[in-house]
Amino acid sequence: MKKTITLSVILVLFGCSVSIAQNQGTSGPQPGQVRVENPNAAIASFDKTMFDMGNLPQGIPAVASFTLTNDGKEPLIISSAKASCGCTNLKYEKDPVLPGRSTKISVTYNAASPGNFIKTITVNTNASEKPVVLSIKGTVDPKKEEPRS
């Protein structure tokens, strides 16, 4: 009986040590270590992440504007900005945004189809590994039939 308990304890301890050894290779700070973030990094700050376009007449494009400010100490670079569909066009500067400066991301929605819409724009920058998702929403009112004479 004692041999069985002793053997069980040894196997449990061995399993724990193997598990700990495997976790040692994972990324992230280990006990006693501190991950140092770059205090001078670019910081992307948007004035808003949702723009309500309200009611739009069908077939008449509408424009939304988002302001991106670099609140960091190094230049901010927009590496990519992509709309969720072809009905939305983007304009933005490709040049780095210097610290304390701002730039605009202009979003044009074509309003071709009547009904409610929500479209997203995914913006990747050097400020974070996670993209920022901007949204536009609204309702496209159908064209009014012109009376026939």
Image (spheres, grey):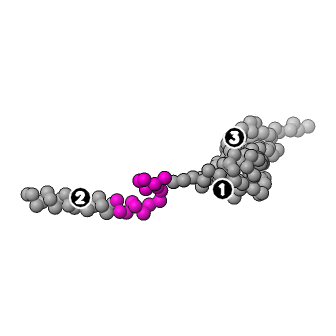
Report the residue marked by disc 3.
Answer: 48
In three-dimensional space, the C-alpha distance between marks 1 and 3, rounded to whole angstroms, equals 19 Å
Q: Residue at x 19, y 57 (%)?
A: 9
Going from N to C along the chain, the mark reached first, 1 or 3, is 3
Going from N to C along the chain, the mark reached first, 3 or 2, is 2
Q: Main secondary structure of the magenta part?
A: loop
Q: Residue at x 69, y 44 (%)?
A: 46
Q: Quadrant of the N terminus?
A: bottom left
Under mark 1, the amino acid is Asn
Report the residue marked by disc 2.
Answer: 12
Report the residue marked by disc 1.
Answer: 126
Going from N to C along the chain, the mark reached first, 1 or 2, is 2
Asked if 39 appears above or below 116 in the picture, the reply is below
Q: Is residue 29 magenta?
A: yes
Image spot of residue 119 (x, y percent): 68, 47
Q: Which mark is residue 32?
A: none
In three-dimensional space, the C-alpha distance between marks 1 and 2, rounded to whole angstroms, equals 45 Å
Secondary structure of the residue carrying numbered label 3: loop
From the viewer's perspective, tell me whether residue 62 is left or right of residue 44: right
Image spot of residue 86 (x, y percent): 72, 55
